[in-house]
C-alpha cells in the first residue's frame, strides 16, 4: 500500500528522476535517510521499474515518428521468435505491441526521414509479414511518460 509520501515521491520522480535525494526529501517533507529508504523500497518492490533520461529525438536527427501496423498470417512460436529477433536488431524501434482486433502488432519507431523509413521497412519485412502499413506523426499534441497515480486505492 502506497501512502501519501510514496505517491508524492513517485510524482516528483516521474517529473525529474535527476532530483537528488535531498531535493526529493525537501519536496516531500521527510529526512534524506527516510526518503532514500522509501525510494529503495519502491525500487525493490518493482513500483519503480527503472530511472532513465529522456532525449529529444529531433535534436538527435530522428524527427519523424511512425506507427507501423503489422498483420501476419502466421501465429506460431517459430514465427514469433523470428519476428522478435528481427525487431531486436533495429534501434529505431521504440515500442512493439501485440494487439487485439484487426491488427496483429503495432510498432512505434523514429526515423530521420522517408528514406530512413524505407530502410526500416526493409528490415522489418525480413520477418515474413502479410501486411505492413505506416502512419506518420504530423503533430504531437500530448506526450508524457508519467503514469497517473489517481487510480491507486485510497490510503487506509
Image: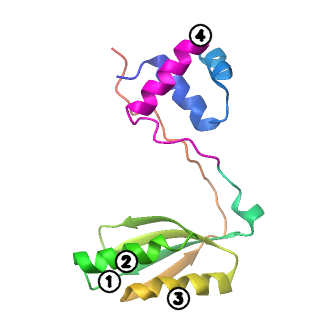
**What is the C-alpha distance between the residues marked 4 and 1?**
55 Å
| Residue 83 rendering spot, x and y as whole percentages | 37, 77
- Disc 3 versus disc 2: distance between alpha carbons? 13 Å
Disc 1: which residue: 72
Q: Residues within 10 Å of mark 1 (few under 14, many from 20)?
A: some
79 vs 138, nearest the viewer: 79
Marks 2 and 3: in contact by CB < 8 Å? no
Q: Which residue is mark 2?
A: 83
N-term mark: 2 or 1: 1
Residues packed near mark 2 inside 10 Å, few (<14), some (14 to 19) or many (20 plus): some
Q: Give the residue pinned by disc 3.
A: 122
Which residue was labeled with disc 4?
Answer: 31
- Please report contact status of discs 3 and 1: CB closer than 8 Å, yes or no: no
Q: Of marks 4 and 1, which one's residue comes earlier in the chain?
A: 4
Give how far across and how far down residue 81 sits, in percent: 31, 74
- Graded by Cα atoms within 10 Å as few (under 14), some (14 to 19) or many (20 or more), the crowding at tag 3 reads few
- Could you tell which of marks 2 and 4 lies nearer the N-terminus? 4
The answer to the question of whether label 2 and label 1 lie on touching residues, with beta carbons closer than 8 A, is yes
Cα separation, mark 2 vs mark 4, equals 49 Å
Per the model, the C-alpha gap separating discs 3 and 1 is 16 Å
**Percent of width and height locating residue 5:** 50, 18
Report helix, strand or loop for mark 1.
loop
User: Is 11 situated left or right of 111 in this image?
Assistant: left
Q: Nearer the viewer, residue 2 or 154?
A: 2
- The structure residue drawn at horizontal position 54% and vertical position 23%, both measured from the top left corner, is 8
Q: Disc 3 and disc 4: Cα gap in Å?
A: 54 Å
Q: Are marks 4 and 1 in contact (CB under 8 Å)?
A: no
Amino acid at each position: 500500500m502506497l501512502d501519501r509520501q510514496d505517491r508524492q515521491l513517485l510524482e516528483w520522480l516521474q517529473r525529474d528522476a535527476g532530483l537528488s535525494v535531498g531535493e526529493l526529501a525537501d519536496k516531500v517533507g521527510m529526512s534524506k535517510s527516510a526518503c532514500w529508504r522509501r525510494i529503495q523500497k519502491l525500487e525493490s518492490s518493482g513500483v519503480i521499474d527503472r530511472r532513465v533520461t529522456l532525449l529529444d529525438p529531433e535534436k538527435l536527427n530522428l524527427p519523424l515518428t511512425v506507427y507501423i501496423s503489422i498483420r501476419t498470417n502466421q501465429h506460431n512460436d517459430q514465427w514469433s521468435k523470428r519476428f522478435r529477433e528481427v525487431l531486436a536488431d533495429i534501434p529505431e524501434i521504440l515500442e512493439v505491441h501485440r494487439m487485439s482486433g484487426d491488427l496483429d502488432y503495432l510498432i512505434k519507431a523514429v526515423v530521420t526521414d522517408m528514406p530512413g523509413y524505407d530502410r526500416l521497412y526493409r528490415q522489418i519485412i525480413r520477418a515474413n509479414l502479410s501486411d505492413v502499413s505506416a502512419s506518420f506523426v504530423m503533430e504531437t499534441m500530448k506526450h508524457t511518460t508519467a503514469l497517473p497515480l489517481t487510480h491507486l486505492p485510497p490510503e487506509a
